[in-house]
Image (spheres, rainbow, N blue to C red):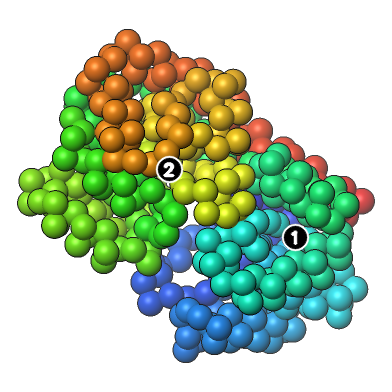
């Protein structure tokens, strides 16, 4: 969202980003656009979504805008209603296939409600876009309307373009960055670490934070230093952590179409840092890897499979490692926000035309 709002602000739009204040939310940092956090009593469950939508709608009633954009389905109803009341365009930014995320798929009654919301919202959007071609195709098949694609890609910085060749993997570490939630392959990854010639750094928190720490402790991986949990890391610091890693991790379980057709920004973060990655063999990732060859693909998340893939990069095949690292350097300029923001700005220019 910082990239999207920053690019629109740079294009001359006055932008306000509205979010939710969590107990662990770090302070807001200065940005070239306005920011506002809503506060409430609940942080999860049905009451959270009800309170969030009510507070969001009440707040939006006091705002004025030329267009209103909902980021994902859980904010869509109040944003659409505010746009309808004011007669302005409604924009739907689908960062994922919300009705198919694991937490929703596991509860059929909840999924039916969100499917209804999706079926109501998507056809009413003046402009709709998502993060990858596969998800765009799913939306188009469901609702018979076009979906643009604005990939969730990091901005490539000048210092990253000038990065020296990646150091030998022995001097780095394995990095997982992202939410510690169900379906991310983290259990198998931790179980694989006793057989891996390297150490694992985990940046992020989530629903499984405590369980994963207990798992690592039970295997003796915390005491030995084979696994390190760093918690939440701010974006600028995370960029530096990524640059010093040897291998990145991008794993998901096939427990919903949203995961299966996903295109996570960490894939691009690893490419920009010039580090190979161990990557789940899902359609979007396979298509990119077929084009750029920057990763080792795995078809399952068994600990033995993950250990073998990691050891190939860290120890067994140094020539393969250097080949993938060099491919990252070549691919980075093509896989950058500098390209994607041009698409984004054209979409909004067309909206207001």
Which quadrant of the structure image shows residue 16?
Answer: bottom right
Instruction: Report the front residue among 31 and 340.
Output: 340
Image-based side of 90 in relation to 6, left or right: right
- The answer to whether residue 332 is visible is yes
Q: Which residue is mark 1?
A: 92
x then y, percent, for residue 189:
30, 44
Instruction: Report the front residue among 275 and 239.
Output: 275
**Mark 2 or 1 closer to N-term?**
1
Please identify the residue farthest to the left as the structure is shown. 223
Instruction: Report the front residue among 148 and 311.
Output: 311
For the point 85% across and 48% down, which residue is it? 146
x then y, percent, for residue 183:
44, 54
Which quadrant of the structure image shows residue 169?
Answer: top left
SS category of the residue bearing label 2: loop
x then y, percent, for residue 159:
42, 29
Q: Which residue is mark 2?
A: 251
- Location of the N terminus (image quadrant): bottom right
For the point 55% across and 50% down, which residue is it? 259
- The answer to whether residue 273 is visible is no
- In the image, residue 259 sits, relative to residue 108, either above or below, namely above
For the point 20% across and 33% down, which residue is it? 196
Instruction: Report the front residue among 353 and 70.
Output: 70
């Amino acid at each position: 969202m910082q990239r999207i709002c920053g690019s629109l602000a740079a294009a001359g739009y006055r932008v306000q980003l509205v979010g939710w204040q969590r107990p662990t939310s770090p302070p807001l940092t200065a940005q070239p656009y306005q920011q506002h956090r809503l506060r409430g009593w609940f942080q999860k469950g049905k009451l959270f979504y009800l309170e969030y939508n009510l507070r969001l709608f009440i707040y939006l009633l006091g705002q004025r805008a030329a267009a209103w954009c909902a980021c994902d389905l859980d904010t869509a109803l109040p944003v659409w209603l505010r746009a309808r009341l004011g007669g302005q365009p409604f924009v739907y930014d689908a960062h994922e296939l919300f009705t198919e995320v694991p937490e929703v798929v596991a509860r059929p009654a909840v999924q039916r409600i969100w499917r209804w919301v999706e079926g109501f919202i998507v056809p009413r959007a003046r402009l709709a876009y998502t993060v990858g071609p596969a998800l765009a195709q799913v939306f188009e098949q469901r609702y018979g309307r076009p979906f643009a694609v604005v990939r969730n890609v990091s901005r490539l910085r000048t210092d990253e373009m000038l990065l020296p060749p990646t150091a030998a993997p022995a001097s780095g570490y394995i990095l997982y960055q992202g939410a510690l939630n169900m379906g991310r392959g983290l259990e198998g990854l931790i179980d694989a670490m006793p057989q891996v010639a390297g150490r694992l750094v985990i940046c992020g928190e989530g629903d499984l934070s405590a369980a994963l720490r207990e798992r690592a402790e039970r295997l003796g991986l915390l005491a030995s230093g084979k696994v390190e949990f760093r918690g939440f890391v701010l974006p600028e610091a995370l960029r530096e952590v990524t640059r010093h890693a040897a291998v990145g991790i991008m794993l998901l379980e096939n427990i919903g179409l949203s995961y299966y057709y996903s295109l996570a920004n960490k894939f691009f973060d690893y490419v920009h840092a010039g580090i190979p990655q161990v990557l789940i063999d899902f359609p979007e990732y396979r298509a990119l890897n077929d084009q750029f060859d920057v990763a080792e693909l795995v078809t399952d998340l068994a600990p033995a499979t993950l250990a073998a893939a990691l050891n190939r990069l860290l120890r067994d095949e140094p020539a393969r490692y250097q080949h993938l690292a060099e491919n990252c350097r070549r691919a980075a300029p093509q896989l950058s926000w500098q390209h994607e923001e041009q698409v984004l700005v054209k979409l909004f220019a067309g909206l207001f035309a």
